[in-house]
């Protein structure tokens, strides 16, 4: 009897693996055959493969029109550059902004001491600088429009951020200042408020990561955590294992940690694995309704209040064709989401910096 159960278990496992492999094969086969995704290409960036190309033409739950000043997408480049904005990346989330949201190239100089990139979007030329060589004494002194990317997760990072903010008066031509801030995971971000222009400081507004209750679309704008772009202990083997696991997984479980939002959500979507997200607020002072951006943009993820619901979630996806469709929705939505974040970022810069 025991042998029979073991054989049944082995047979069930083999069937499941075959169906999962078939579902993955069909998913990526459909990406290249489906008329709704044109000229798509796979692009490696950090430890993630993302889809680049034209926005899918099929209307889903989400709306591909712009939220801000226009109802139609504008090309990234125009013939005339009217403004220049420097972005100085002193936190790893700057790479998510530059390489994943802007889909821009980055050139390594002096063996990584400096990293530099240029990207024109609409009438703005963005210049990105990062690396250990980017220090207050070595950046362009004639900067006029600046976005600082800083880390405020813990006290040592806050102290480092303050050295940059306190140095800003030394840039005599500086007119406009904004920040992209990796906030504290408990949303304890009061340290930045004295630097805001509304409180007599120089910083006009902040794009902040994690669902802060301070988000008001004036002083603070919500920004996604995104994918992990820097892991010092990562090896090519561990990276390949992780990518393989995501590609072979129909679902990726995303439990609440110190904060509700985690890199795994966005990494799963990069590979078309459906995030199953524990929809619970984290401890601390963050918003009691987490995942603000995912919900606002109707992300095709699965929210559950308790892990006891997981069994029913899996039972609801009975056929491989259902899973293929859902995984393709995740891939298409993530393309849409990154472009919406780019449009949002650029429109806020144009409005708040240049009055457009």
Image (cartoon, grey):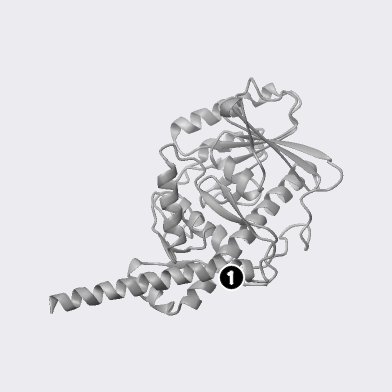
Residue in the picture at 33% in, 72% down: 14
Residue in the picture at 65% in, 26% down: 168
Percent position of residue 38, x then y: 69, 65
Percent position of residue 92, x then y: 53, 39
Mark 1 falls on what kind of element? helix
Percent position of residue 65, x then y: 72, 64
Look at mark 1 in the image and give the residue it sits on: 30
Up the image or down, 219 lies above or below 31; here it is above
Residue nearer the viewer, 75 or 89: 75
Residue 212 placement, left or right of 103: left
Percent position of residue 46, x then y: 53, 44
Can I make out residue 220 in this image? no
Residue nearer the viewer, 264 or 178: 264
Can I make out residue 308 in this image? yes
Q: Which residue ends up furthest to the right in the rendered image?
A: 80
Residue in the picture at 50% in, 68% down: 25
Residue 4 placement, left or right of 58: left
Up the image or down, 317 lies above or below 268; here it is below
């Amino acid at each position: 009897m025991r042998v029979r159960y073991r054989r049944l278990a082995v047979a069930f496992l083999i069937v499941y693996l075959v169906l999962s492999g078939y579902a993955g094969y069909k998913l990526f086969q459909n990406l290249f055959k489906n008329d709704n995704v044109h000229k798509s290409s796979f692009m490696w960036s950090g430890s993630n493969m993302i889809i680049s190309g034209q926005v899918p033409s099929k209307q889903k739950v989400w709306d591909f029109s712009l939220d801000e000043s226009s109802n139609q997408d504008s090309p990234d480049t125009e013939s005339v550059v009217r403004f220049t904005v420097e972005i100085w990346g002193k936190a790893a989330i700057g790479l998510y902004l530059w390489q994943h949201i802007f889909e821009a190239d980055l050139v390594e100089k002096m063996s990584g001491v400096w990293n530099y990139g240029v990207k024109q979007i609409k009438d703005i030329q963005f210049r990105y600088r990062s690396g250990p060589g980017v220090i207050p004494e070595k950046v362009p002194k004639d900067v006029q429009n600046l976005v600082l990317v800083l880390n405020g997760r813990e006290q040592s990072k806050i102290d480092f951020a303050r050295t940059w903010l306190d140095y800003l008066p030394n840039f005599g031509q500086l007119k406009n200042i904004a920040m992209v801030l990796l906030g504290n995971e408990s949303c304890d971000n009061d340290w930045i408020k004295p630097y805001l222009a509304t409180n007599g400081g120089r910083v006009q507004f902040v794009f902040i990561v994690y669902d802060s209750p301070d988000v008001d679309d004036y002083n603070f704008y919500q920004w996604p955590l995104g994918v992990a772009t820097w892991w010092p202990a990562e090896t090519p083997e561990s990276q390949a294992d992780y990518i393989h696991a995501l590609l072979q997984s129909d679902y990726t479980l995303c439990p609440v940690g110190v904060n509700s939002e985690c890199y795994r959500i966005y990494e799963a979507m990069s590979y078309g694995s459906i995030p199953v997200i524990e929809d619970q607020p984290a401890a601390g002072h963050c918003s009691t309704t987490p995942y603000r951006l995912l919900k606002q943009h109707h992300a095709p993820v699965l929210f559950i209040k308790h892990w006891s619901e997981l069994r029913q979630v899996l039972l609801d996806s009975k056929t491989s064709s259902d899973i293929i469709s859902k995984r393709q929705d995740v891939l298409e939505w993530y393309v849409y989401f990154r472009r919406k974040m780019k449009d949002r970022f650029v429109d806020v810069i144009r409005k708040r910096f240049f009055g457009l």
